[in-house]
Amino acid sequence: MHVLTVANFKGGSGKSTTAGHLAHAFEHLGFRVAAVDSDPQGTLHRWAERTEWSLPAVALPSGNQLADLTGYIDPRRFDVAVVDTPPLELQRRITLAALQAATDVVVPLGSTFSDWDSLPPIWPALDEAGVPNERTSVLFTSVRGRVAHQTYRGELLEDGRHPLKAFVPTLERYAQCMAFPVEMHAADYYRMAAEEIVERGGWTK
């Protein structure tokens, strides 16, 4: 089973939005998917309940639960588990457990200086959790203009990181998404990101 953990150092970085949309994108691509909410705030789980998701979402806000993830998500029934995490700066133990359980990691990143400035602490955490660099991708979200986005992309590449070619622009349907069911279609930006993650990781169903 592929375990995709969505993580970042700070709150408000789009982790829950990214996790929810990527989970549905993988389902759209034909994978059997479960979503896991490890954030004690429970945003992803409430979103799933409120809008009656087509895929299961479970709340596991404990490092011990994440360490035994297959005890809650049966790998015989699911191909992918997408794990939403709390901010590393607030719940380090839980986030590290989610990273240790991961086969792949996505770091959502807004294309503003404040988002960029708070990014560096995630890299030592990935190293501590034993996540190889080749299994980690950065997904730019809330992209308004191309200048900052391309500048930060170039700096990531220079640092040996992997920014996905796909990115998610600032759109009202993403800003307000937690009030509505997730709708996935062929041109969806998260679907394009999911396709890239699948290809990069050599995922199989």
Image: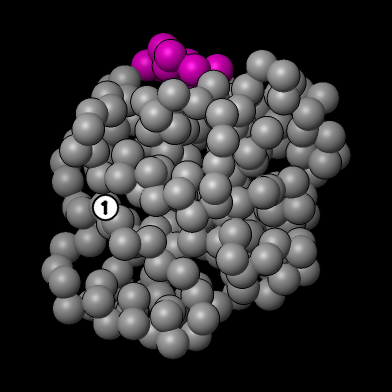
Of residues 154 and 201, the one drawn nearer to the viewer in this rendering: 201
Up the image or down, 46 lies above or below 135; here it is above
Instruction: Determine crowd level at label 1: few under 14, some 14-19, many 20+ residues with C-alpha closer than 10 A.
Output: many
Identify the magenta region: 48-56
Q: What's the colour scheme? A: one colour
Q: Secondary structure at mark 1?
A: loop
The answer to whether residue 51 is seen in the rendering is: yes
Of residues 187 and 38, the one drawn nearer to the viewer in this rendering: 187
Disc 1 target residue = 168
Q: Quadrant of the C terminus?
A: top right
Q: Position of residue 181 (x, y in %)?
A: 31, 20
Up the image or down, 135 lies above or below 42; here it is below
Residue 151: quadrant of the picture: bottom left
- For image coordinates 39% across by 29% down, the residue present is 29
- For image coordinates 54% across by 48% down, the residue present is 202
The answer to whether residue 40 is seen in the rendering is: no
Q: Position of residue 92 (x, y in %)?
A: 72, 58
Of residues 38 and 127, the one drawn nearer to the viewer in this rendering: 127
In this picture, residue 176 sits left or right of residue 97: left
Of residues 160 and 123, the one drawn nearer to the viewer in this rendering: 160
Q: Quadrant of the N terminus?
A: top right
In this picture, residue 65 sits left or right of residue 167: right
- For image coordinates 63% across by 22% down, the residue present is 78
Residue 186: quadrant of the picture: top left
For residue 50: magenta? Answer: yes
- For image coordinates 76% across by 53% down, the residue present is 100
Q: Position of residue 198 (x, y in %)?
A: 47, 45
Q: Position of residue 203 (x, y in %)?
A: 55, 42
For residue 120: magenta? Answer: no
Amino acid type at mark 1: Val
